[in-house]
Amino acid sequence: MKKVFVTMLILVFTVCVFAEVNVAIVFATGGLGDKSFNDAAMEGMKMAKEQYAIEYDFAEPSAITEYETYLAQFANSKKYDLIISIGFDQADALTKISERFAEQNFAIIDMVVMNPNVASYVFKEQERGFMVGYASALMTIKTGDVRINEDKLVGVIGGMKIPLIDANIAGFMTGVNYADNGVKSIHSYVNHWADPAKGKELTLSMYEQGADVVWGAAGRSGLGVINASKEKNFYSIGADSDQGYLAPENVLTNGMKRVDNTVKIAIKDVIDGKFEGKIYSLGLKEDALGYSLNLLPEDVIAELEIAKKKIIAGEIEIPATIEEVK
Amino acid sequence: MKRFWKQGIEFEMIKIFKKYENSIYSFTAILLAFLVGSILIHLSGFSVIKAYSALFDGAFGNVFNLTQTLMNTIPLIFTGLAVAIGFKSGLFNIGGEGQMYLGAFATAIATIYLSFLPVYILIPLVLIIGGLAGSAWGFVPGYLKAKTGAHEVVTTIMMNYIGILITSYLLLKYFKEEGPIPQTALIPESARLPELVEYSRLTWAIFIAVFVIIIIDIFFKRTELGYKIQTVGENRSAAEYAGINSNKMMVLSMMISGFVAGLAGSTIVMGVLHRFITNFSPGYGFTGIAVAVLGKNKPWGVLFAAILFGALQTGGITMQLFAKIPMDLIVIIQGLVILFVAAPILIKKLLRK
Amino acid sequence: MNIIEFKSIIKKFGDFIANDKIDLIIKKGEIHCLLGENGAGKTTLMNILFGLYKPEEGKIFLREKPCKINNPHKAIELGLGMIHQHFMLIDRLTTTENIIVGEEPLKNGLVDMKKAREQVKQISDNYHLAIKIDEKIENISVGEQQRVEILKVLFRKAEILIFDEPTAVLTPQEVNNLFTTLRELKAGGKTIIFITHKLEETMNISDRVTVLRKGKVISTVNTCDTSPKKLARMMVGREVLLNVNKEKGDLGDKVLEVKDLSLIGKHKNIILKNINISIRKGEIVGLAGVSGNGQLELEECLTGLRKVTSGKIILGGDEITHTPTRIRRKKGFSHIPSDCLKRGLVSTYDLTKNIILGNQDSFTKNGFLQQNDINEYCKEVIEKFDVRCQSLNESVNNLSGGNQQKLVIGRELSTNPKFILAAQPTRGVDVGAIEFIHNNILKMRKQKKAILLISAELEELLSLADRILVIYEGKIVSEKNNYTKEELGLLMAGKKASDEEILETGNRIRND
Ligand SMILES: Nc1ncnc2c1ncn2[C@@H]1O[C@H](COP(=O)(O)OP(=O)(O)OP(=O)(O)O)[C@@H](O)[C@H]1O
Ligand SMILES: [Mg+2]
């Protein structure tokens, strides 16, 4: 009994010591409940609280104009060891606020702000592209699955032709080539982040051409990709978070962006006193990118794990632009 | 003698009351809203004192917070005025949001092409361009109302959607800056309104807003056109009897209303965002309706109401951040204010015991 | 029994005393008339009784018990019912809905429309108040609207009915019907308070009369002991000439000509057919007719508020058939509208803003209204036309009904027009004011203006007009210089005076 009491006391004590670290987070305008970045980031905060016993506050702005006010309010209180911005549209606001509060440490996820007190966490997009591309190539040659056709073709649909998306596509293509089993890949762009109808249209046209695994790296337009796969019963791959719930029989896997882990990493750096205002490129190694299991068969998972280890070990080169893909 | 005195005082009080009747009702409405709000806060298990002191502190507690309140007030002044102007001609302009987007977009694009102009021409010019874009957006429902009788509430709501989507489309198609964010490039330095307090984003736009209030006030009190528009709103039959072309007046008032709503967008682009971004507004156009209702459609009333709503918005941030009370409560208080203002009969009854 | 007793009631609006120590007794089962000039305080007193205003001093006894009436609900509870000077009906609702509103019979928490209809039907049968049960208010005549108001009051089981100038808007026929109803109500044991400006009506319907002047009770008399002349004298405080004397004048050029004007309605119904009118300088042409026979539409056609189907309107030699109202006004077209409150005034505006209505551009310089000039002009007009008000900046809502009318007339006669369209110019004004308005119209005639007088008042037409046209069902059925009252009444009701006459009229129209 006494022992238990003492352990508890120690526990409380440790918590108190670590509770010195305060973190604030400003979410993207979608707010909590978006089943995407904000929710994932919140998950990361909770994990950090559990593991490192930090305290946190959060803000849910309802409009872009409010980012600055929230960031300034947090910074002005001088209470926080780190203030995290979620979402790329906070860049303008954070640039100004971080200049103004030069003593305050900030972090931004998925975007770069070039100030000495801002740690920018971006992703090696091509790595997750590689994983899902490789998975697609291994899947499409399977037999005895109604969702799979004869053709050895897979596809990827990007939201817009911008470097970030092209890195994903380049990764996807490299992954397909890596399988080296005669599978070919095609790609196209929706040119909009929130046009599911167009996304679906493009997916269906890929399906007509014989593609039976299609990845949508296209924001909300990607919903159209999943929708199409559900309608015509073939495989689709989701992006960023686990979108399996949208079509449990058709979402093969997801190219995951682990914002939760990234948030945790950013907080850990501060706790360890390693905060630096620079660009961090995270990937498979840090568990900041990855894939989800969903409908993947055992053998494919095994292959993927082998490739993942090789990537982390630096044994596989993945180019970040389509032009570089051989 | 004593009785005489008592009567005299009573009479004076009635006179004062009559003069400020509207303001007294509005203040009572606000007080009641806060009172009911405090009950809600209490029932949700928060401390009322903590909540309201955080709210007040967040809105007016220091210079920075005050500047943020005023910054939030500016677009509400414009959108509130826009609704009030529509009301003057008897039209319910719910299209402030769309008109504001048009104004913001036009201003952002115009600055890019006109950046060679000297500042003292550039700034007024792009403001006017923003206003005209909003004006064009107000013209459509006005014209439809005049020609076909299409109800302006329906058409302005539809124009909101069209306005928000069309600016987004044009942006993505022609003007988008490189990068993942659907936004234009930053507007040139020369087109940015100077900040009054460094880093506050409170700019000269506040003076523009007050200037517009004065203009609109004079317009309706002193000008013939203002008189005609108002007459249409007060009594359309009488206006037509007097030879006033009520259709023309309705279209004009929608255009003026749209112009002012457009300025909300222009000043946000020139003072706050320094570029056009899709979905930038937290619904200024709609809050403008509440502002106009609370301000009794009077220009100076709108100023007062806009400050109140700006303060609630800004103070609400502090309340949310540091007293941990959900922002929804602010929305509820705003709703209650409107409820009590819109139900003056209730308040009149309460006041007359 | 004294069903109502007012004891030294005082009501002030600011410095102004609208009711000054009013003592008044109403007996159960009588029809009691309240007479008084415009602004004498009749409506105010009734509003106090009905709980709309709170008096500064004084008591009201109801059924010989003192009682406080703080609001209309209380008044209704106590068995009072008021038919206001300006109807308070909701245009978009049906007659039945208007009658039951607030007192709806319920079934399972929902309005039981079937029962409501039955109840309304029953009351309307009992008192011979014929209405179309499911018609919207906007589609029925003024007389019928009034019946709806009465039914509304009866539906709430009123014992005391207050009528504020009910006859001002009615046609002679409708007045007769109303009087029948009033007698029936009286026979049914109801008490009636009746406000009017018309002395004959008072003589005709009431048991007792109380005259108010400047907020004070002058006296209460039995109707059988008095005469119109005596009453007029009590009201105005001086001798009133009930008949104006008109000098003979010579006629000048034609000012207004209406040629073959026709108007076809939405449902292809004929509203006006081949109307021909010509009016010369210094001439008053009367247009007689029971309201609802096309006068209102003719009024709107002439002013440009409605497009004519065919025909021409010529003003001072220029065709104005398709000219907008604004230009017509510029050309010297002046208009006293029949519905003064709806068309002639903006009730929320103050006097100065109303005085420039229709003429606003004359007071504008560089787009700005010249408030000083306007104030001067306004002062002039209200002095000249004896509009009683407390200040130029009060809203016209505060003016008594008759003063509102005088304000409009003052405005329209002060613009030095060529032609004056005077539609029902004396509706709702007191005898003194009628005399005054009539004199002003005659003054205009003397100044060689052309005047079209649309009226439902036979006396008014007979005493003012040089020539009278009778309109019936959208057609001019007769035109003559002198009619007898009876003759005119018959023609207005659509009965032919004699075949000869019709022939004669027809010939003249053809020869013109
Ligand atoms: N709400 C008000 N505020 C100020 N003055 C008022 C108000 N109501 C009435 N008055 C004034 O009180 C006086 C009496 O008005 P009231 O309406 O009782 O007259 P009335 O006898 O009904 O006249 P009418 O026959 O013209 O209807 C008028 O001079 C009017 O200007
Ligand atoms: Mg009256």
Image (cartoon, coloured by chain):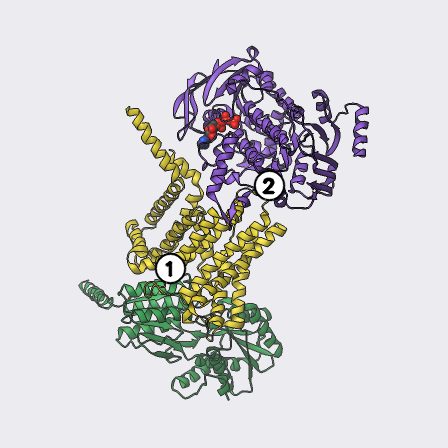
Chain colours: A green, B yellow, C purple
**Image quadrant assignment for residue C195:** top right
Give whichever of C417, B219 is nearer the camera.
C417
What type is the residue that disc 2 sits on? Tyr
Query: On what subunit does the disc labeled 2 rest?
Result: B
Position of A16 relative to B338 (above/below): below
Q: Which residue is mark 2?
A: B241
Q: Find residue C232 and report its horizontal and vertical position in percent.
A: 55, 18
Which residue, given by chain and number where applicable, does mark 1 sit on? B71
Taking the spot 60% from the left edge, 73% from the top edge, the residue there is A204
Q: Nearer the viewer, mark 2 or mark 1?
A: 2
- Residue B141 is left or right of residue C373, and the answer is right
Q: How dense is the environment of label 1, judged by Cα within 10 Å: few (below 14), some, or many (20 and up)?
A: many
| Chain containing the residue with disc 1 | B
Marks 2 and 1 on same chain? yes
- How crowded pointer 2 is (Cα within 10 Å; few <14, some 14-19, many 20+) is rated as many
In percent of width and height, residue C432 lies at: 55, 23
Query: Looking at the image, which is closer to me, B32 or B210?
Result: B210
Q: Secondary structure at mark 2?
A: helix
The image quadrant where one finds the C terminus of chain B is: top left
Looking at the picture, tell me which residue is in the foreground, A195 or B217.
B217
Q: Marks 2/1: CA distance?
A: 44 Å
Which residue occupies the foreground of this view, C490 or C412?
A: C412
Q: Secondary structure at mark 1?
A: helix
Residue A155 in sight from this viewpoint? yes
Quarter the N terminus of chain B occupies: top left
Location of residue C266 in the rendering, given as x and y in whole percent from the top left corner: 70, 42
Q: Earlier in the sequence, mark 2 or mark 1?
A: 1
Residue at x-position 41% and y-position 56%: B209
Q: Which mark is residue B113?
A: none
Amino acid type, mark 1: Met
From what the image shows, is residue A59 above or below residue C407?
A: below
Does the residue tagged 2 have its C-beta within 8 Å of any atom of ligand 1?
Answer: no
